[in-house]
Amino acid sequence: MKGLAWAGLGVVAGAACFWPAATLETAVQQRLPVGSTVVLSGSVWKGAGHIQSSGVTWPIDWQFMPSRLLAAQLAWQLDARPAGAVATLQVAVGSSGATLRTPVFDGEIRTLHPWFPALRLLGVQGRARLDTSNFELSSATPWHAEGEGRLALSELSLAAIGGSGLGNHEF
Protein backbone atom coordinates (compact mmCIF):
# COMPACT_ATOMS: atom_id res chain seq x y z
CA MET A 1 0.00 0.00 0.00
CA LYS A 2 2.87 2.37 0.79
CA GLY A 3 4.36 1.74 -2.64
CA LEU A 4 1.06 2.73 -4.23
CA ALA A 5 1.01 5.98 -2.23
CA TRP A 6 4.56 6.82 -3.33
CA ALA A 7 3.68 6.03 -6.95
CA GLY A 8 0.64 8.33 -6.67
CA LEU A 9 2.80 11.15 -5.31
CA GLY A 10 5.26 10.58 -8.14
CA VAL A 11 2.51 10.88 -10.75
CA VAL A 12 1.21 14.09 -9.13
CA ALA A 13 4.72 15.56 -9.00
CA GLY A 14 5.32 14.60 -12.63
CA ALA A 15 2.05 16.22 -13.69
CA ALA A 16 2.98 19.35 -11.73
CA CYS A 17 6.11 19.72 -13.87
CA PHE A 18 4.03 20.34 -16.97
CA TRP A 19 0.54 21.38 -15.83
CA PRO A 20 -0.09 24.94 -17.09
CA ALA A 21 -0.59 27.35 -14.20
CA ALA A 22 -3.09 29.38 -16.27
CA THR A 23 -5.62 26.55 -15.85
CA LEU A 24 -5.76 27.39 -12.12
CA GLU A 25 -6.68 31.06 -12.60
CA THR A 26 -10.42 30.47 -12.09
CA ALA A 27 -9.90 28.50 -8.87
CA VAL A 28 -7.59 31.20 -7.47
CA GLN A 29 -9.92 34.00 -8.64
CA GLN A 30 -12.84 32.51 -6.66
CA ARG A 31 -10.83 32.76 -3.43
CA LEU A 32 -9.85 36.42 -3.85
CA PRO A 33 -11.76 39.52 -2.75
CA VAL A 34 -14.49 40.65 -5.17
CA GLY A 35 -13.09 42.81 -7.96
CA SER A 36 -9.64 41.21 -7.84
CA THR A 37 -7.92 39.80 -10.91
CA VAL A 38 -5.27 37.12 -11.28
CA VAL A 39 -2.97 36.21 -14.17
CA LEU A 40 -0.72 33.12 -13.95
CA SER A 41 1.92 31.80 -16.34
CA GLY A 42 4.42 28.98 -16.32
CA SER A 43 3.64 25.60 -14.82
CA VAL A 44 2.40 24.41 -11.46
CA TRP A 45 6.06 23.44 -10.81
CA LYS A 46 7.46 26.93 -11.36
CA GLY A 47 5.78 30.07 -12.53
CA ALA A 48 4.93 33.70 -12.10
CA GLY A 49 1.95 35.98 -12.29
CA HIS A 50 0.23 38.80 -10.52
CA ILE A 51 -2.82 39.49 -8.40
CA GLN A 52 -4.45 42.91 -8.51
CA SER A 53 -6.90 44.04 -5.85
CA SER A 54 -8.05 47.52 -4.81
CA GLY A 55 -5.40 49.18 -6.96
CA VAL A 56 -2.50 47.19 -5.47
CA THR A 57 -0.66 44.76 -7.75
CA TRP A 58 1.12 41.79 -6.18
CA PRO A 59 3.65 40.21 -8.59
CA ILE A 60 4.04 36.58 -7.47
CA ASP A 61 6.48 33.74 -8.15
CA TRP A 62 6.30 30.15 -7.00
CA GLN A 63 8.54 27.10 -7.00
CA PHE A 64 7.57 23.50 -6.24
CA MET A 65 9.58 21.98 -3.37
CA PRO A 66 10.25 18.34 -4.40
CA SER A 67 12.13 17.58 -1.16
CA ARG A 68 8.81 17.75 0.72
CA LEU A 69 7.60 14.68 -1.22
CA LEU A 70 9.69 12.66 1.24
CA ALA A 71 7.28 13.87 3.95
CA ALA A 72 4.31 12.88 1.71
CA GLN A 73 3.47 16.54 1.05
CA LEU A 74 3.07 18.69 -2.04
CA ALA A 75 4.72 22.01 -1.19
CA TRP A 76 5.53 25.35 -2.82
CA GLN A 77 7.58 28.39 -1.92
CA LEU A 78 5.58 31.54 -2.75
CA ASP A 79 7.12 35.00 -3.11
CA ALA A 80 5.16 38.22 -3.65
CA ARG A 81 6.67 41.63 -4.28
CA PRO A 82 4.09 44.40 -4.43
CA ALA A 83 5.50 47.92 -4.67
CA GLY A 84 6.84 48.74 -1.24
CA ALA A 85 6.79 45.21 0.23
CA VAL A 86 8.12 41.64 0.12
CA ALA A 87 6.18 38.59 1.30
CA THR A 88 7.18 34.91 1.36
CA LEU A 89 5.33 31.80 2.45
CA GLN A 90 5.63 28.03 2.20
CA VAL A 91 2.41 26.13 1.51
CA ALA A 92 2.17 22.34 1.83
CA VAL A 93 -0.70 19.91 1.28
CA GLY A 94 -0.63 16.37 2.64
CA SER A 95 -2.80 13.68 4.13
CA SER A 96 -3.21 15.68 7.36
CA GLY A 97 -4.40 18.83 5.58
CA ALA A 98 -2.77 22.10 4.56
CA THR A 99 0.18 23.72 6.32
CA LEU A 100 1.48 27.28 6.11
CA ARG A 101 5.11 27.70 7.17
CA THR A 102 7.47 30.58 7.80
CA PRO A 103 5.35 33.49 6.58
CA VAL A 104 7.39 36.69 6.28
CA PHE A 105 6.14 40.15 5.36
CA ASP A 106 8.16 43.34 5.19
CA GLY A 107 6.65 46.46 3.70
CA GLU A 108 4.11 49.23 3.65
CA ILE A 109 0.86 48.45 5.45
CA ARG A 110 -1.16 49.91 2.56
CA THR A 111 -0.20 46.84 0.47
CA LEU A 112 -2.26 44.77 2.94
CA HIS A 113 -5.43 46.89 2.56
CA PRO A 114 -7.04 44.63 -0.12
CA TRP A 115 -6.71 41.58 2.15
CA PHE A 116 -7.64 43.28 5.43
CA PRO A 117 -10.46 45.78 4.70
CA ALA A 118 -10.51 47.07 8.30
CA LEU A 119 -6.98 48.44 7.79
CA ARG A 120 -8.15 50.36 4.72
CA LEU A 121 -11.33 51.56 6.46
CA LEU A 122 -9.34 52.99 9.39
CA GLY A 123 -6.65 54.35 7.07
CA VAL A 124 -3.81 52.52 8.81
CA GLN A 125 -0.46 53.58 7.30
CA GLY A 126 3.14 52.82 8.13
CA ARG A 127 5.42 49.82 7.81
CA ALA A 128 5.13 46.28 9.13
CA ARG A 129 7.63 43.46 9.45
CA LEU A 130 6.40 39.99 10.34
CA ASP A 131 9.14 37.40 10.83
CA THR A 132 8.18 33.86 11.73
CA SER A 133 11.23 31.79 10.91
CA ASN A 134 9.95 28.73 12.78
CA PHE A 135 6.15 29.15 12.69
CA GLU A 136 3.68 26.62 11.31
CA LEU A 137 -0.12 26.78 10.96
CA SER A 138 -1.83 23.49 10.18
CA SER A 139 -5.41 22.78 9.12
CA ALA A 140 -5.32 19.38 10.81
CA THR A 141 -8.36 18.91 13.02
CA PRO A 142 -8.34 20.91 15.19
CA TRP A 143 -6.40 23.82 13.67
CA HIS A 144 -2.95 23.96 15.17
CA ALA A 145 -0.40 26.78 15.36
CA GLU A 146 3.10 26.30 16.66
CA GLY A 147 6.24 28.39 16.81
CA GLU A 148 7.07 31.98 17.48
CA GLY A 149 7.25 35.17 15.56
CA ARG A 150 7.96 38.87 15.77
CA LEU A 151 5.80 41.72 14.51
CA ALA A 152 7.35 45.17 14.28
CA LEU A 153 5.18 48.17 13.34
CA SER A 154 6.81 51.49 12.56
CA GLU A 155 5.76 54.97 11.48
CA LEU A 156 2.15 54.09 12.29
CA SER A 157 -0.60 56.59 11.61
CA LEU A 158 -4.36 56.37 11.55
CA ALA A 159 -6.28 58.50 9.03
CA ALA A 160 -9.53 57.80 10.93
CA ILE A 161 -8.27 60.04 13.75
CA GLY A 162 -6.78 62.78 11.61
CA GLY A 163 -3.54 61.05 10.62
CA SER A 164 -2.20 61.09 14.16
CA GLY A 165 1.12 59.34 14.63
CA LEU A 166 0.95 56.20 16.72
CA GLY A 167 4.71 55.58 16.90
CA ASN A 168 6.62 52.31 16.68
CA HIS A 169 5.63 49.02 18.32
CA GLU A 170 7.07 45.55 18.57
CA PHE A 171 5.27 42.35 19.58
Image (spheres, rainbow, N blue to C red):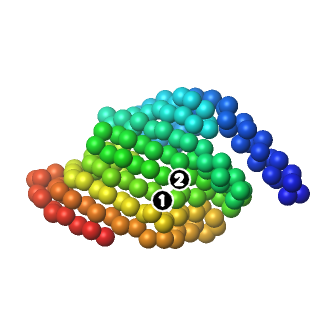
Sooner in the amino-acid sequence: mark 1 or mark 2: 2
* Residue type at the position of mark 1: Thr
Residue that carries the numbered disc 1 in the rendered image: 102
Could you tell me residue 32's position as x and y percent? 47, 41
The secondary element bearing badge 2 is classed as strand
Whether tag 1 and tag 2 are in contact, CB under 8 A, the answer is yes
Quadrant of the snapshot with the N terminus: bottom right
Q: Residue 85 vs residue 169: left or right? A: right
Query: Is 110 placed left or right of 62 in the picture?
Result: left
Question: Which residue shows up at 33% across the image and 64% down it?
Answer: 151
Residue 30, percent across and down?
53, 38
Q: Is any part of residue 102 visible from this angle?
A: yes
Q: Give 83 or 30, whichever is nearer the viewer.
A: 83
Residue placed farthest to the right in the image?
A: 1
Q: Quickly name the residue at label 2.
A: 90
In front: 96, or 18? 18
Above/below status of 95 relative to 148 = above
Visible residue check, residue 118 = no
